[in-house]
Image (cartoon, rainbow, N blue to C red):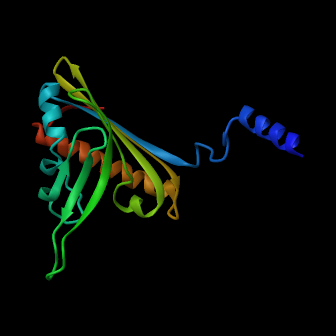
Amino acid sequence: MFRRIIALCGLCLAMPLAAEVVPSETGGFASSQSVVVGVDSASAWSMLVEPQFWWHHSYSDNSDNLTLDPHAGGCFCEVLPGVNGAPSGSAEHMRVLFVQPHVELRMTGALGPLQTEGLKGTLSVKLEAVQDGTRITWDYVVGGESRMSLAELAPVVDRVQGEFLGNLADALGGAIEVD
């Protein structure tokens, strides 16, 4: 009996783990957009890591309550003010995974209403020097389980991600090219 268990364990280790449990065409969606802004990547980076100046979706309806610690493990968080004498609270929008200043910021988190579902999102914002300034490429990939239809959520999330990128571009003087 013991030999059968060992043989079974060896067989399991040789097989790929969960290779086809959730087919990619039904387990999520991605939003990808880019703009070129007329500033260098250092200026674009400086604004990117100050979301209180351009990120307009918040639980408190006040972007001044947003902070971003641009270090691996850092928090893109929000302080929630107290209401009617109640204590204040807080919200984590995303957690920083990767930082290469002036080049890329990668964070993970299910944003807004996605937080109430079994979803995970990864946002990668890449900055690339181009002839007229900096190309900002904004990719948000979402996967997991949801009680809401991902097919219905995807266009809404894509639109909101476009708002974030547009707001960032506007804070940098406006897009000079949109892809």
Q: In this view, does 25 lie to the left or right of 171?
A: right
Point out the image quarter for the C terminus. top left
Q: Is residue 126 above or below residue 151?
A: above
Query: Total label count?
Result: 0
Judge whether residue 56 can be spotted in this image: yes
Q: In this view, does 81 lie above or below 36?
A: below
| Residue appearing at x 18%, y 17% in the figure | 131
- Closest to the observer, 60 or 17: 17
- Closest to the observer, 100 or 124: 100
- In which image quadrant can residue 64 be found? bottom left
| Residue appearing at x 81%, y 39% in the figure | 6
Q: Is residue 29 left or right of residue 100?
A: right
Q: Residue furthest top?
A: 131
Q: Where is residue 154 in the image (x, y as percent from the top left)?
A: 44, 52
Q: Where is residue 124 in the image (x, y as percent from the top left)?
A: 34, 37
| Residue appearing at x 29%, y 56% in the figure | 92
Q: Which residue lies furthest to the bottom in this view?
A: 84
Q: Which residue lies furthest to the right in this view?
A: 1
Q: Is residue 62 left or right of residue 178?
A: left
Q: Where is residue 71 in the image (x, y as percent from the top left)?
A: 25, 38
Q: Residue furthest front?
A: 2
